[in-house]
Amino acid sequence: MTQEIATRDAYGNKLAQLGEKYSHIVVLDADLSGSTKTNIFAKKFPQRFFNMGVAEQGMMGTAAGLAACGKTVFVSTFAIFATGRAWEPIRQSIAYPNLNVKICASHAGLTVGEDGASHQAIEDVAVMRVIPQMKVFVPSDAVETEKILEAIVEDAGPCYVRLGRAKTPVLFDPSYSFKIGRGHVLKEGKDLCFFTHGFLTSHVLQAAEILAQKNISCTVASMASVKPIDADLIVAMAKKHRTLVSVEEHSIIGGLGSAVAEVLTDKCPHSLIRLGVNDEFGQSGSYQEVVRHYKLDAEGIANSVLGKKA
């Protein structure tokens, strides 16, 4: 049976490990440390953890000040609050001076389904990606989450890491090496290439198996690094496959599909099928129910591809 671990759990445990090696790491949280899992770091290093209360804008300003004093600051809360309420101080106080603040936001996308549309951040990648000097990462599993944390703690400047609440299958081997700005091919085929990341990667791999039964051979490329994005990999896949498909647990406006389309437009014109949440808000329901509603489960993805190709 495939092991399942939530990326927020991987984040909390790895952050506490990094705290032992890097004494300059400071962690801030907006009164949600039990949910974001920064409470693990707080118990281990109480002198380097600060609960800022439900005051996300002030938390980002404090993070900027600590980073300006030489600290590497990890900031956590739910994605809808981190990217919505605090967008302006992130832009003005963190990104503009290029400060070393790592915004690691949990409960992103549709995994927070039961809390309803108000708490489902399906625009967060778009609003973070547009900010100059802000890097954006969306890990697919617990292993990739840990690898991304190892990379960003050594990388100067601000970044946004998108984490989820629900447990998801572990897809990567511990020997996997994540590099900022590089994608990773999980499965190779010759007819169709999926570009995906995050919690839907396991669904895409299952969809590839369904399509294989229809004699459609699929490549699955994991694009955890959304900004900078691996333009070389996208161009190589465009030259190799007849059909390109992006799949994301996010609005199809401004997210991974848009990033891939921008590369194709600039470097290698090619049609692209974009699967995700259309221009609408989310729905209340369990994670599985909401993903099925948007046809982002394995069967829905496969059927959408077959319908588009018909």
Image (cartoon, grey):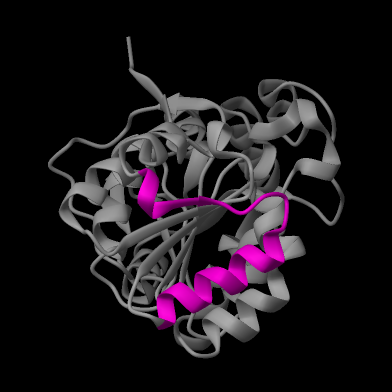
Q: Is residue 41 magenta?
A: no
With respect to residue 100, does 3 lie above or below?
above
Q: Is residue 254 visible?
A: no
Residue 226: x and y, percent? 47, 65
Which quadrant would residue 9 be assigned to in this image?
top left
With respect to residue 242, does 97 lie above or below?
below
Residue 153: x and y, percent? 28, 63
Q: Please name the residue shown 38% across and 59% down the image.
A: 26
Compare residues 127 and 43 and report the one nearer the observer. Answer: 43
Compare residues 116 and 76 and report the one nearer the observer. Answer: 76
Tell whether 95 sits left or right of 180: right
Q: Is residue 60 magenta?
A: yes
Tell whether 173 sits left or right of 153: left
Which quadrant holds the C terminus? top right
Q: Please name the residue shown 38% across and 44% down the image.
A: 46
The boundaries of the magenta stretch are: 46-68
For the stretch drawn in magenta, the main secondary structure is helix
Q: Is residue 276 visible?
A: yes
Compare residues 50 and 151 and report the one nearer the observer. Answer: 50
Q: Please name the residue shown 33% across and 18% down the image.
A: 3
Which quadrant holds the N terminus? top left
Looking at the image, the residue that sits furthest to the left is: 175
Q: Please name the residue shown 39% across and 78% down the image.
A: 157
Tell whether 106 sits left or right of 81: left
Looking at the image, the residue that sits furthest to the top is: 1
Residue 23: x and y, percent? 22, 59
Number of marks in the rendered image: 0
